[in-house]
Image (cartoon, rainbow, N blue to C red):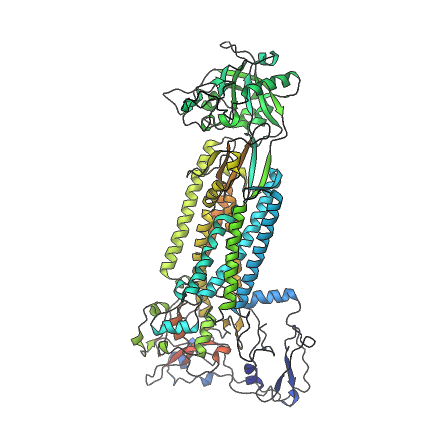
């Protein structure tokens, strides 16, 4: 807890009471006592309470503007007439008894005091510790170092959590460097666990990146010697803003670069370190006649099998049909030996097994509506069933085959079939190439299927053909459907740990080696320039930010008339900063909106199951919501490829690219707020006498750990950033689908894609728009009339601190204004920060 310097107490107590510093011991120190470390003696013989000088001035009021002495006539510059006498008091108090309540009662109050240290209503304990270092060197973890210490603690805690999770996940999955499975179970449970883990990741990410950004700002905060050197060359430095201009020396530049570069793996990889994998069951479908069920064998040479090794590019690829026992379907390479094509190996054997099970009553009979509702959603939402016999009402007159059509689900469905097999070409032609199984189920009695074919003249669609009316279905029960996995990548977690460790090392190194006093806040700069005025900016009144950027060493000593302007917050950041920030924000919002519209159109075009793309829910995966703008997907993956990190990391980088873009935008966004709030803090000194908010407080100065942004802005912005990053993690994500055969073994058709969720994208888009609008609306707030727009420019700040006398003003409450006005003989007045009485500068008067 910071206390006032004992020297500042002496100017009140003077020689009336003596202050004896008592050595602190564990038995005597009370940290909740506001008088800790001090003993007051001979208080009854003192003259505390007697009216003494200097007398305290009245606060500024609007009457200054209407005062005829100030507004019309020109005085000699004396302001003594405005001093308000202090009422006389008794010279003695009698016996002194302290009834002061403890300042801090418990840990919760200490935490609140910590939060409020930069707020408007922050109180301050006005005592210095009795055991203060006699050398005057600040404590190692005081001031801005206290904030960096908290940042190191946060980074260390996050590193420890990541390390424990990595060790636990590795021990549980036993997958080595490959993708590991943490949990396998119901998809609802897996998705809920995944959502909570991502919330935790984004909270930890906010803490870690907040600690990194805080340290970067402290690292880039200039020292007074660096500021003096820049001013001597007519240059300026930025105070209270992270700035590359302030980085002097290779050590600072390397540390700053490491903090920036270690952020990239966190944005690109961390949100995809844990992900879900959906296991889908592939199955065979056989459209059979009633005779199939009464026969004792199956003619496996029937040319009835349809399928592809990859997605068909033309509908005419559905025309060829192969025998049930054909195992060398890829004719592109003119193979003559069986190549064990994965989806055709067991077409004949499975049909024989289904025929035998049907005769034994081991298959479940489903009527048409039950069959459509069970198999219509696709294999991602199936439950309890696998291979299927679809039985027609009668034997077609044009064939003697008992199997009319057979296919493997994953090798059959495509955009040409509306990603469904239950809707035949005739139904698709009537319904604009859309297959909505719920509508089809209402017409289940008239359900029919047809062989898919296309003509060479219209190879982009299937043609209408003869149909087979369906009577019922026989489904094979299974327990393999509907499972999901919660998985993690050890490679990604190691990269995250490395980035985390790099940040922790840099923060701890800076904390222990960067010991010079820095000007991290506007208050730090004012305090430094009031204590030791800058000779470069002497006699340069009203030096604004714009004038400071065009600073000329030879222009000193020219009086300037006072003409105040009505200023608003938006004028604090430069035009260039506003243009770049708004352009990038609007560009990101526009591109996101355009991509969302494109994705919704593609979603509705490929899915007939949903009336709206937002009806699939928040953050959930749909096989129809796949990012196909770029060639990002990987299909036909073997089990070995599916568990490797090579393909995964490439897709992860693509899915998390928006995280990096939003972080860059947030940096610019945060800088805009920092500039506006700094200007507001500066302007308030023109109407209110306030204690300076510094990182290493002395006297009446207020302590702060929050640098330029007070907690009332810093915390909401940090929370908003965390929410936005979490929404993005639910908007774009890695969708991994592992295809299992009916025996539970992985097929070489598993695939990974970048999935998107339309509802999450819409919410993230609206949230981002609200953040930008909030920034713009805040920009229309008014700055206090009469202030000079100095921004964060060190030259402009130093020009406003050219005190004439007023030794020790930096330790007391100060106010900016005229310490003397222009005299009748034309002698210019003078404006500066002062702890003594000041008045509002008179419009038109010249000041120097």
**In front here: 739 or 319?**
739
- Is 79 drawn above or below residue 378 in the view shown? below
**In front here: 153 or 777?**
153
Q: Residue at x 36, y 84 (%)?
A: 823
Q: How many marks?
A: 0
**Viewed as shown, does residue 642 lie left or right of 825?**
right
Where, by quadrant of the figure, is residue 87 drawn?
bottom right
Residue reaching furthest bottom? Answer: 45
Q: Is residue 718 visible?
A: no
Residue reaching furthest right? Answer: 27
Where, by quadrant of the figure, is residue 560 drawn?
bottom left
Residue 741 drawn at (x, y percent): 57, 28
- Is 146 drawn above or below residue 658 in the view shown? below
Residue 553 drawn at (x, y percent): 31, 75
Q: Residue at x 56, y 55 (%)?
A: 159
Residue 185 drawn at (x, y percent): 62, 38
């Amino acid at each position: 807890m910071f206390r006032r310097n004992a020297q500042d107490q002496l100017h009140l107590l003077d020689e009336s009471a003596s202050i004896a510093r008592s050595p602190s011991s564990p038995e005597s120190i009370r940290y909740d006592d506001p008088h800790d470390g001090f003993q007051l003696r001979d208080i009854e013989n003192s003259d505390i309470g007697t009216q003494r000088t200097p007398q305290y001035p009245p606060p500024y009021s609007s009457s200054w503007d209407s005062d005829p002495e100030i507004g019309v006539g020109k005085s000699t510059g004396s302001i003594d007439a405005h001093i308000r006498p202090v009422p006389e008091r008794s010279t003695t108090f009698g016996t002194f008894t302290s009834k002061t309540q403890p300042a801090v009662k418990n840990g919760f109050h200490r935490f609140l005091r910590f939060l409020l240290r930069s707020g408007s209503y922050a109180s301050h304990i006005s005592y210095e510790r009795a055991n203060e270092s006699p050398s005057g060197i600040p404590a190692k973890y005081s001031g801005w170092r206290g904030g960096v210490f908290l940042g190191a603690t946060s980074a260390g805690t996050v590193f420890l959590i990541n390390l424990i999770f990595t060790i636990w996940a590795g021990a549980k999955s036993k997958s080595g460097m490959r993708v590991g499975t943490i949990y396998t179970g119901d998809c609802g449970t897996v998705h809920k666990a995944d959502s909570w883990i991502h919330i935790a990741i984004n909270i930890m990410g906010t803490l870690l990146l907040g600690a990194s950004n805080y340290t970067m700002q402290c690292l880039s905060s200039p020292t007074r010697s660096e500021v003096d050197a820049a001013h001597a060359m007519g240059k300026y430095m930025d105070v209270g803003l992270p700035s590359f201009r302030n980085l002097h020396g290779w050590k600072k530049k390397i540390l700053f670069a490491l903090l920036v570069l270690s952020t990239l793996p966190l944005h690109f990889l961390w949100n995809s370190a844990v992900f879900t994998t959906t296991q889908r069951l592939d199955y065979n479908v056989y459209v059979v006649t009633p005779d199939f069920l009464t026969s004792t064998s199956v003619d496996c040479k029937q040319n009835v099998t349809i399928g592809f090794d990859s997605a068909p590019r033309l509908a005419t690829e559905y025309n060829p049909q192969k025998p049930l026992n054909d195992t060398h379907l890829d004719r592109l390479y003119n193979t003559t030996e069986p190549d064990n094509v994965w989806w055709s190996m067991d077409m004949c054997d499975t049909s024989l097994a289904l025929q035998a099970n049907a005769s034994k009553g081991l298959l479940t009979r489903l009527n048409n509506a039950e069959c459509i509702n069970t198999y219509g959603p696709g294999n991602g939402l199936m439950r309890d069933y696998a291979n299927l016999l679809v039985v027609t009402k009668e034997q077609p007159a044009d064939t003697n085959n008992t199997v009319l059509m057979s296919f493997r689900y994953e090798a059959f469905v495509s955009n040409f079939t509306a990603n469904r097999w239950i809707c035949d070409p005739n139904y698709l032609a009537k319904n604009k190439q859309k297959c909505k199984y719920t509508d089809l189920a209402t017409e289940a009695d008239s359900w029919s299927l047809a062989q898919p074919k296309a003509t060479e003249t219209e190879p982009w669609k299937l043609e209408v053909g003869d149909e087979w009316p369906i009577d019922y279905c026989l489904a094979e029960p299974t327990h393999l459907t509907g499972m999901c996995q919660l998985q993690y990548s050890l490679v990604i977690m190691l990269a995250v740990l490395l980035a985390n460790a790099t940040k922790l090392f840099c923060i701890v190194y800076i904390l222990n080696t960067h010991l010079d006093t820095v000007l991290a806040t506007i208050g730090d700069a004012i305090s430094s320039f009031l204590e030791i005025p800058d000779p470069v900016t002497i006699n340069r009144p009203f030096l604004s930010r714009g004038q400071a950027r065009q600073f000329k060493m030879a222009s000193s000593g020219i009086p300037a008339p006072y003409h105040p302007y009505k200023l608003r917050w938006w004028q604090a950041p430069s035009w260039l900063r506003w243009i770049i920030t708004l352009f990038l924000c609007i560009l990101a919002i526009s591109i996101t909106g355009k991509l969302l519209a494109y994705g919704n159109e593609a979603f509705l075009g490929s899915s007939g199951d949903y009336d709206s793309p937002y009806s699939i829910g928040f953050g959930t995966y749909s096989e129809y919501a796949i990012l196909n703008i770029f060639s990002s997907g990987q299909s036909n993956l073997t089990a070995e490829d599916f568990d490797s990190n090579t393909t995964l990391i490439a897709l992860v980088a693509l899915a998390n690219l928006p995280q990096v873009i939003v972080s860059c935008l947030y940096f610019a966004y945060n800088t805009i707020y920092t500039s506006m709030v700094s200007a507001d803090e500066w302007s308030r000194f023109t109407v209110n006498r306030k204690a300076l908010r510094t990182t290493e407080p002395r006297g009446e100065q207020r302590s702060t750990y929050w640098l330029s942004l007070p907690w009332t802005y810093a915390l909401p912005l940090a929370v908003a950033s965390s929410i936005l990053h979490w929404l993005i993690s639910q908007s774009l994500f890695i969708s991994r689908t592992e295809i299992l055969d009916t025996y539970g073994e992985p097929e070489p058709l598993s695939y990974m894609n970048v999935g998107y969720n339309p509802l999450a994208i819409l919410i993230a888009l609206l949230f981002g728009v609200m953040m930008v609008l909030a920034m713009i609306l805040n920009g229309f707030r008014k700055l206090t009339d009469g202030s000079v727009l100095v921004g964060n420019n060190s030259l402009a700040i130093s020009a406003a601190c050219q005190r004439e006398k007023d030794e020790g003003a930096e330790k007391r409450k100060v106010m900016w204004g005229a310490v003397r006005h222009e005299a009748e003989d034309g002698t210019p007045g003078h404006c500066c920060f002062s702890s003594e009485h000041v008045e509002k500068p008179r419009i038109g008067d010249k000041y120097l």
